[in-house]
């Protein structure tokens, strides 16, 4: 079973929150909200999208490449853990 199927409800909830955030941007633009407000809303969407992307990438690495929590090859496990940490940092 794919990690997206196992985590389907959690992922869908995140996507629905993203949709709500995008709709808030649309409402703000329709209401002629100040540009600073629209920029803050857009930054929130970017952060939420990055969080979703990190979750998907991390789960993909753990499921399809190597799971650092249970790989017997300590060097490979360490490399996978470092990759996951780098992705988290980069997309933070």
Image (cartoon, grey):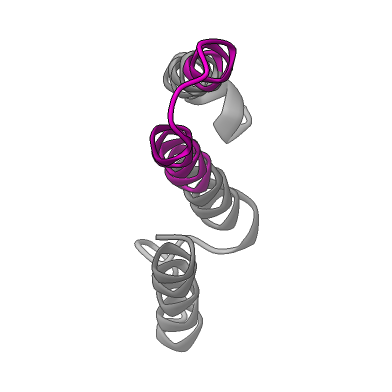
Q: Main secondary structure of the magenta part?
A: helix
- In which quadrant of the rendered view does residue 37 lie? top left
Say how many tags the image has. 0
Residue 87 on the magenta span: no
Residue at point 43% right, 33% down? 41
Q: Judge whether 46 appears above or below 7 on screen.
A: below
Q: Position of residue 38 (x, y in %)?
A: 47, 33
**Which quadrant is home to the N terminus?**
top right
The correct choice, above or below, for 59 with respect to 35 in the image is: below
Residue 24, position as x, y percentages in the image = 47, 16
Q: Is residue 12 left or right of residue 41?
A: right
* Image spot of residue 68 (x, y percent): 41, 67
81 with respect to 26 (left or right): left
- What residue occupies the far left of the structure in this picture? 69
- Is residue 70 shown left or right of residue 60? left
Quarter holding the C terminus is bottom left
**Residue at screen point 45% across, 88% down:** 75
Q: Residue at x 45, y 67 (%)?
A: 84
Q: Of residues 24 and 9, which is closer to you in this image? A: 24
Quadrant of the rendered image containing residue 40: top left
**Residue 31, placed above or below residue 66:** above
Q: Nearer the viewer, residue 32 or 73?
A: 32
User: Residue 6, position in %: x, y?
Assistant: 50, 23
Give the magenta-colored segment's residue range. Answer: 23-50
Of 88 and 25, nearer the camera is 25
């Amino acid at each position: 079973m794919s990690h997206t199927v196992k985590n389907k409800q959690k992922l869908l909830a995140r996507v629905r929150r993203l949709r709500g955030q995008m709709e808030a941007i649309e409402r703000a633009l329709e209401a002629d909200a100040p540009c600073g407000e629209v920029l803050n809303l857009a930054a929130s969407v970017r952060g939420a999208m990055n969080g979703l992307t990190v979750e998907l990438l991390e789960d993909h690495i753990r499921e399809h490449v190597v799971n650092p929590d249970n790989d017997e090859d300590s060097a490979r496990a360490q490399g996978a853990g470092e990759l996951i940490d780098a992705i988290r940092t980069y997309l933070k």
